[in-house]
Amino acid sequence: MKIIIINGPNLNLLGKRETEIYGHKSFEEYFKELQMLFPEVEMELFQSNHDGILIDKIQEVGFTYDGIILNAAAYTHTSVAIGDAVAAIEKPVIEVHISNIYAREEFRHKSYISPHVKAVICGFGLDSYRLAIQGLIDLQK
Ligand code: DQA
């Protein structure tokens, strides 16, 4: 099983960025833990601060990989184009957020991604990603 985690803008700063919301761990550190937890899953990590680059990656893997875990970060709330890219591909996408976006500012309550994904997981901290991987595994059963 081959999956990819696609992280959007500012998620390269995890561990340094607003640690009261996003925690103290870098994503690279957490990614190693995920690889150890799911040795049977071939896992890739991709991060970009640019919406077009995120769209290119979604298109590139969206017909061949077994699933995508997407945290589009702030683009979640603004990008019709990323929503359209998710709608255009065939493979299941799980939308994740570290924080509970519905418990935060009103502008974070809108997602242009959610209508096109298989499922949404948010509010479990970084553990949202682990739950999403487990969800993709369970979908394959
Ligand atoms: C986020 C929530 C977004 O509202 C925010 O812009 C992010 C991170 C999350 O993972 O909680 O950058 O997607």
Image (cartoon, rainbow, N blue to C red):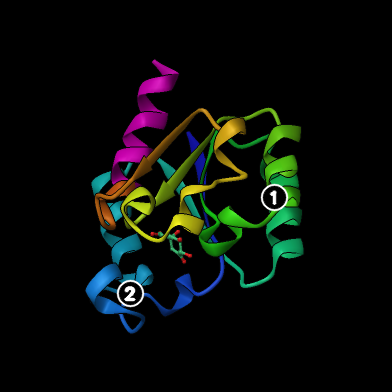
Farthest-out residue, top: 141
How far from the left and from the top, in percent, is residue 5? Answer: 49, 52
What's the amino acid at mark 2? Ser
Residue 37 or residue 80, whichever sits in front: 80
Q: Is mark 2 within 8 Å of ligand 1?
A: no
Mark 1: few/some/many CA within 10 Å (<14, 14-19, 20+): many
Circle 2 crowding by C-alpha within 10 Å: few under 14, some 14–19, many from 20 = some
Instruction: Confirm or deny contact between disc 2 and disc 1 (CB under 8 A).
Output: no
Q: Is residue 63 left or right of residue 74?
A: right
SS category of the residue bearing label 2:
loop
Residue lying at 73% horizontally and 54% vertically, measured from the top left:
55
Total numbered labels placed on residues in the image:
2
Q: Which residue is mark 1?
A: 82
Q: Is residue 114 left or right of residue 125?
A: right
The boundaries of the magenta stretch are: 129-141
- Choose between 59 and 17: the one closer to the eye: 17
Q: Residue, x 51% and y 39% (percent of image)? A: 2
> Does the magenta segment cover residue 70?
no
Asked whether the viewer can see residue 19, the reply is yes
Residue named by callout 2: 26
Dominant secondary structure of the residues highlighted in magenta in the image: helix
Residue type, label 1: Ile
34 up-or-down from 115: above or below = below
**Quarter of image, res 54:** bottom right
Picture coordinates of residue 72, whole percent (x, y): 55, 56
Res 42 → quadrant: top left
Which sits in the foreground, 58 or 123? 123
Answer above or below: position of 34 versus 15: above
Tell me the distance, in whole angstroms, between the alpha carbons under discs 2 and 1: 25 Å
